[in-house]
Amino acid sequence: MKVLHLSSFDSSGGAARAAYRIHVGLKQIGIDSQMLVQYQAIRDQTVLTVEDKVKAKLRSILDSSISKFRSPTHYLFSPQWIPDAVAAKVAQIDPDIINLNWVCNSFLRIETLLRLQKPLVWTLQDMWPFTGGCHYSLGCDRYQVTCGHCPQLNSTKEQDLSRWVWQRKAKAWQHLNLAIVAPSQWMAKAAKGSSLFRNLRIEVIPFGLDTTVFKPLDMRVARDLLNLPQNKQLVLFGAIDATGDKRKGFHLLQAALERLRQADWSERIELIIFGSSAPDNPLDLGFEAHFLGHLHDDLSLRIAYAAADVMIAPSIEESFGQTASEALACGTPVVVFRDTGLADIVDHLQNGYIAQHCDIQDLAQGIAWILSSEQHHELRVAARRKAEQAFSFEVVGKQHLSLYEEILQETRCNQGLLEAFTHSVL
């Protein structure tokens, strides 16, 4: 079996990391797997590019120009209207099956999917595949019908850019041999409720990770390496643009920390933040805060996770949440919100805490529960065990392989029936 993964990036951002990990996981169980990307950063002969970076950058600028009227939230909106060279490159590689990942940033035009002429599996890194262009709906449910009147575009018109993008998807994708992989039950539910994907096969397979890289490290050693205090309980928060992206929930963590400060935790807790640098004007969090900046390699992330007593991942909307699974693999309990993809990662009161969605008081209670738990060591052991059993490359790779085999078998059967029917008619 020859598998090809399409992804705009191979390492930049959580979606790219997830796609590359699927690819590596398949290779580790002996599958012939390759990646085709728009921008390559990893030195890996199985990762290929469609074109040079100059053409890719120009394509990105042109694609984004049509959606210049952005939402006040500044979230991504991708029309994907610029022609691309992907289909020709795919034809040269000639895979048996194609796994789509995050293919925005002008990498893959909506209409190109029909030209690929292969069975397709789409791993949902965000909501874009079934919306009119937004990557997360921010509570809007118009993707369940035909989009239009898009709040992220500040649009008051039904026939707006989001409706145009939705219509293009509906027309181009109606006859695709397409199956969907959602990394969480939350994302699967959203996809099933969408007008574009509700009639498709949707499977839930979590994002995998290398549990030989993300693994426990002595807490004292980790804190020494990061120059963090040994006599405090450390609360960890991190994401890309950790303090700036409202969807990641830092404002909710701030409010929860204020509740803890009022409950006399201020002398016991300090905060660690990665994914953002220290602001020019220090934040008044009521606790000492240590900013680690942007961590670009897995070893640095592992050390940060191992240094913490608890990881907080308070995203409002999230397809999965790899910081949470990575933290568990390093033996660090995690606090998340219900009704997000993160809730699939954590087992409530076993390796972390699942708070009610956007409930600040419950978030604070979850942090306090873990920090004050007499079974903290057991929580750490359970965290590691969950990662090994649910997210290892071998486990996740075999789930993908099983799905691919089923799809290819079904495709061969359908082709055989079509050939038999055609022969009988002739």
Image: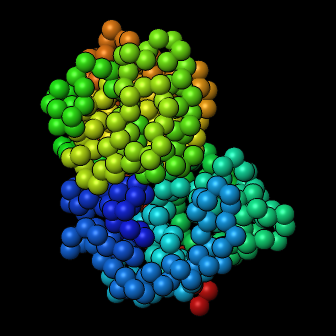
What residue occupies the far top of the structure in this picture?
Answer: 374
Look at the image and tell me in which quarter the N terminus lies.
bottom left
In the image, residue 405 above or below residue 119: above
Q: At 18% from the left edge and 43% from the top edge, which residue is drawn? A: 212
Q: Position of residue 125 (x, y in %)?
A: 48, 56
Q: Position of residue 7 (x, y in %)?
A: 41, 68
In the image, residue 116 above or below residue 312: below
Q: At 47% from the left edge and 64% from the top edge, which residue is drawn? A: 102
309 relative to 303 in the view: left or right: right
Q: In which image quadrant can residue 71 be found? A: bottom right
What residue occupies the far front of the structure in this picture?
Answer: 281
Q: Position of residue 400 (x, y in %)?
A: 37, 54
Q: At 37% from the left edge and 55% from the top edge, which residue is drawn? A: 18
| Colour scheme employed for the rendering of this structure | rainbow
414 relative to 224 in the view: left or right: right
1 relative to 404 in the view: left or right: left
Is 165 in front, or is 96?
Answer: 165
Q: At 21% from the left edge and 56% from the top edge, which residue is drawn? A: 28
Look at the image and tell me in which quarter the C terminus lies.
bottom right
Q: Is residue 264 visible?
A: yes
What residue occupies the far bottom of the structure in this picture?
Answer: 426
Is 267 in front, or is 149?
Answer: 267
Is 337 in front, or is 20?
Answer: 337
Q: In which image quadrant can residue 185 be found? A: top right
Q: In which image quadrant can residue 44 be found? A: bottom left
Q: Is residue 2 visible?
A: no
